[in-house]
Amino acid sequence: MSEDAPVAPRADPSRSGPASVDPDGSTTDDDAPALTWSVGAVAERLHVSASTLRTWERRYGLGPTDRTKGGHRRYSESDISRVELLHGLIGRGVAPRTAARLAATHDVAPVAHPSSTADVDGALEAPQLFAADIFASSARLDGGRLARLLAAAVIEHGVIDAWDAYLQPALRHVAEAVADGTIGVDSELLVCDTLATELRAYVRSWPDLDRRHAGVLLATVDDDPHSLAVVALQAALAGRGVACHSFGARLPAGALANVIASIHPAVVFLWSQAAKSTDDHVWQVASSARADALVMLGGAGWPSRMRHEDTAQVARPTSLADQVEIVLARLADRTS
């Protein structure tokens, strides 16, 4: 394996099933190593140079936190999430030091199970009140209140209902405010990053996920650093007892092929909002890697018909609830 390739978890032969990997880079099997990424692989995902990554690490302390036994620096998925946020903020005109401050703190102390939600209960009485509170908190860059609001919505209503009735409308409200200049893009990115953090914390709050197969692979094809649709699906599946292998933005086609070959998934979910071609490379890898794998396409970026789609098993669910039901049905078919 090259130095720039991701390091996949290796299964202990004494165990009955493979270890799965949480989206923040930690494994769901306590004894299995996490999937980590080299500087070169992260540079490829972010479309920046390795020297830029090293500069960000030196100036802002945002770099790889893991090392291999041989001493090579490795990024976890949490490390990549922070660097992606920094990259996105700078690309949208936020001052580098401000961007670094937000990126460095975005995933501190998630509150997936807050001890008290009294100060946000009023906002949960109606989606409109919730969206207004999210907007006001984002305008103040109040990450603490955002975390409490978002966590409380998920806990109170469950992932699917919260996503449909509260989270997506609030995200649209914030995006519209950015578009008309009412608030800055840093506010929107703080909301998205806080929501991703809380959803991942929700996943980790389920210690007894069904890890017999962990036969679901989730990935974002876009440059979106938040991958909210992917993280939401992982969280919704966690609530139904299903563990996933979930990866963030810009998963290279070669790395996807390696992971598919390693874990033999029943379902490969690919999310894209940016327009893709009918013969997109990631699509080709996912649709041809395993004949028995269902490729589930999400997001508006996929053409209505992919090349060679008639020879692959493909589903295009349009809602989070439908995505969950398709995955559950597919896993049931595999184990029956």
Image (cartoon, helix red, strand yellow):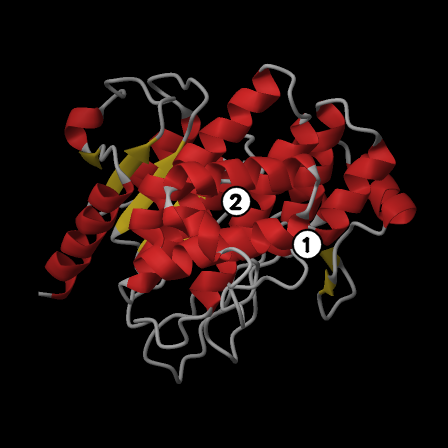
**Of 125 and 167, which appears nearest the observer?**
125
- The residue that mark 2 highlights is 248
- The residue that mark 1 highlights is 75
**Of 155 and 329, which appears nearest the observer?**
155
Q: Which mark is residue 28?
A: none
Name the element at disc 2: loop
From the viewer's perspective, is 334 left or right of 159? Answer: left
Pinpoint residue 155: horizontal percent, then vertical percent. Answer: 40, 61
Q: In the rendered structure, which amino acid carries the disc numbered 2?
A: Gly
Query: Which residue is pictured at 42% across the width and 29% down the height?
Result: 272
Whole-angstrom CA distance, mark 1 to mark 2, is 12 Å
Q: Which residue is situated farthest in the left direction here?
A: 336
Query: Which residue is pictured at 47% across the width and 48% down the height?
Result: 123
Is residue 243 placed above or below 132 in the rendered structure?
below
From the viewer's perspective, is 180 left or right of 323? Answer: right
Q: In the rendered structure, which amino acid carries the disc numbered 1?
A: Tyr
From the viewer's perspective, is 226 left or right of 257? Answer: right
Quadrant housing the C terminus: bottom left
